Image (tube, rainbow, N blue to C red):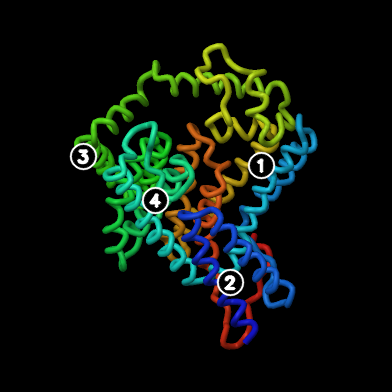
């Protein structure tokens, strides 16, 4: 009975966690703490063994290299405080243990459902509460519109994967897709638009390459019905005189200078903002920026080229594993959603440091772990046993 209670607490904490990620970071962290405690209890009692998908190895290497960068940081204490985000990587083995079998599919259902409610709230903010300009954008219940748009991008990707790759139960994702895409568009967040477009294009290619022809049509329809503020924001992506575009180009040059100054360990985690003025480009618009608005550049600048190599290893390992599961695994829509999430993260991450956003990172790690967890048999609760684990290879 004790085993069953632990399992039940862990499973319901997981469902609450994947939903709370889109509503409240505080609630998500509380539920993650509950998951950690129950997971450790299962390990301590011998009723579970540590196991993780193959991509967890390079993620651990990346964490170790981050610690090395912290030791050589221009301010090790401040960098060490920022390193607390590394604890979020525990989401991978915990989800892999708890979300076995059909639980992974149910977790994805929770993500889509809560995302739909969050999208509806964002639309209300735009249409009724006048969150309809660059100074005040829809942000759902999150603290920042960038986080909100990034989460919407990931949820829309998951819903689209469910719609394309599930032969049954496709009505709900089909019903919520318009709200998810509308809310995403109304955030005015160009990087998330790019990420969602690339992610959905990847899904169409995975399903049937002929479907890719539908994407330009859908984008054209969206532009035709979008409010003028949205279309103006879209066109600004191609305006080289746009201040934010100019600033991002300048950040590339600044990042290159930072990397050249310390290619092995970088400036140190969370040190880019502090060192920004020293490497500031003459064409920069902002005097200082919290980060370089580019994930690979940010990692190399603050943690060094070896850390960037480990991160690329992590991304490649995850993508290769998910591709194999798409061909031969269970619940293929989960594998497709994981691959599309990586595509969306990478493309949006060329213009925004989304990998450094805790809420975004947690959801990303969940989405790429669920397909691997789905291949595992659910614990035999009635018998009080758990199938053997071990680090996956």
Tell which of 95 and 338 is nearer to you: 95
> Which secondary structure, mark 4?
helix
> Which secondary structure, mark 1?
helix
Mark 4 or 1: the one toward you: 4
Residue 265: image x %, image y %? 74, 32
The residue lying furthest to the front in this view is 129
Residue that label 2 marks:
10
Residue that label 3 marks:
221
For image coordinates 57% across by 82% down, the residue present is 380
Left or right: 360 with respect to 227? Answer: right
For image coordinates 69% across by 50% down, the residue present is 60
Relative to 392, say whether 278 is above or below: above
Residue 77: image x %, image y %? 77, 38
Distance between mark 2 and mark 4 Cα atoms: 26 Å
Look at the image and tell me whether residue 173 can be seen. yes
Distance between mark 2 and mark 1 Cα atoms: 31 Å
Instruction: Say the numbered circle drawn on residue 310.
Output: 1
């Amino acid at each position: 009975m004790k085993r069953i209670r632990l399992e039940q607490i862990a499973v319901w904490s997981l469902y609450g966690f994947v939903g709370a990620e889109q509503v409240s970071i505080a609630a998500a962290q509380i539920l993650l703490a509950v998951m950690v405690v129950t997971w450790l209890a299962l390990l301590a009692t011998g009723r579970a063994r540590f196991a993780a998908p193959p991509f967890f190895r390079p993620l651990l290497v990346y964490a170790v290299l981050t610690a090395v960068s912290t030791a050589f940081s221009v301010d090790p204490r401040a960098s060490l405080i920022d390193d607390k985000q590394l604890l979020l990587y525990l989401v991978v083995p915990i989800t892999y243990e708890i979300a076995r079998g059909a639980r992974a599919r149910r977790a994805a259902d929770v993500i889509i459902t809560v995302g739909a409610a969050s999208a509806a709230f964002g639309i209300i903010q735009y249409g009724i509460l006048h969150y309809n300009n660059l100074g005040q954008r829809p942000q759902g219940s999150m603290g920042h519109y960038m986080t909100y748009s990034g989460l919407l991008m990931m949820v829309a990707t998951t819903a689209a994967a469910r719609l394309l790759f599930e032969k049954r139960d496709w009505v709900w994702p089909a019903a919520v897709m318009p709200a998810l895409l509308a809310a995403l568009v109304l955030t005015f967040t160009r990087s998330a638009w790019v990420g969602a477009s690339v992610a959905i294009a990847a899904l169409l290619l995975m399903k049937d390459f002929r479907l890719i022809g539908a994407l330009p049509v859908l984008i054209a329809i969206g532009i035709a019905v979008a409010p003028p503020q949205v279309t103006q924001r879209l066109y600004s992506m191609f305006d080289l005189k746009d201040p934010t575009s100019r600033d991002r180009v300048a950040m590339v040059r600044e990042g290159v200078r930072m990397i050249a100054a310390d290619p092995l360990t970088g400036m140190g985690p969370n040190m880019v903002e502090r060192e920004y003025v020293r490497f500031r480009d003459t064409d920069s618009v902002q005097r200082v920026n919290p980060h370089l608005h580019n994930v690979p550049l940010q990692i190399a600048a603050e943690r060094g080229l070896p850390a960037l190599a480990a991160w690329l290893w992590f991304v490649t390992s995850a993508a290769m594993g998910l591709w194999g599961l798409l061909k031969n695994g269970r619940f293929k829509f989960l594998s497709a959603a994981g691959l599309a999430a990586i595509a969306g993260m990478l493309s949006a991450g060329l213009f925004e440091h989304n990998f450094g956003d805790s809420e975004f990172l947690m959801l990303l790690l969940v989405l790429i772990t669920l397909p691997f967890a789905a291949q595992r048999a659910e614990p035999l609760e009635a018998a009080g046993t758990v199938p053997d684990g071990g680090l996956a290879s």
